[in-house]
Amino acid sequence: MKYLAIMGSFRKNKNSNQALDAFLQGVEKNGHEVEKLYLRDMDIKNCTGCDNCSRTGHCVFKDDMNIIYNHLDNCDAIVVSAPIYFNSTNALTKTMVDRSQRYWGIKYGYGREKIEIPRKIGMFIGIGGANYTYDQFLAGQLVMDMFFKSINAEFRGNYLISETDKGEVSTKNRIVEELIEIGENFENLSKFSIQKID
């Protein structure tokens, strides 16, 4: 299987990255191919709602989002790891999600019955520094649910980690071990939603 891993935090070696790397350790145990992209290193313009994708099947911008489109069109699984800011995904990740309007345009505009969007499976890893609340990740989950629907991915699960301001993910052994196990078995898992503190 080909996995696309998107790291949505501006901070390269912190919690979002640590959680994603733990998951990918499990994925790589099975010899799967992994492409990891750091959104902070990419030039991705904001969606302007011009509707060009609905008319033509293509985004009007020629930037690094085309790299992501290519991977989305050719991967079997995608995992997005991002921090939660003000109860939703951070702006860097949300910009990438907004530019996935191209797929919505293909489905319901130009591409209807013309362009096939390959099926895949998806997972969201959410990182929240604040104290645990049951609805801490709700807005981010809704955003990612719509993202996975647009790219034709079966949304397999959320792995949500609260209270990371009190200690980095890499120090939370039970979480690291569970993420490795999920990565190792991801393609065979049923739908899940897990929220952890430590």
Image (tube, rainbow, N blue to C red):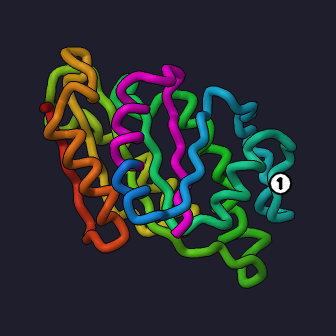
Residue 166 in the image: above or below residue 1: above
Locate the C terminus and report the quarter of the image it occupies.
Answer: top left
Assess disc 1: are there few (<14), some (14-19) or many (≥20) residues with their C-alpha within 10 Å of its C-alpha. some
Measuring from the top left, give residue 10's x and y in whole percent.
53, 22
Residue located at (32% from left, 61% from top) = 184
Measuring from the top left, give residue 89's x and y in whole percent.
44, 34
Q: Is residue 48 left or right of residue 192?
A: right
Q: Which residue is mark 1?
A: 52
Q: Nearer the viewer, residue 12 or 196?
A: 12
Q: Is residue 76 left or right of residue 111?
A: left
Measuring from the top left, give residue 119's x and y in whole percent.
54, 75
Which quarter of the figure has residue 183?
Answer: bottom left
Query: Magenta segment, which residues?
Result: 1-24
Residue located at (48% from left, 28% from top) = 90
Measuring from the top left, give residue 23's x and y in whole percent.
35, 48
Residue located at (27% from left, 69% from top) = 189
Residue located at (22% from left, 54% from top) = 193
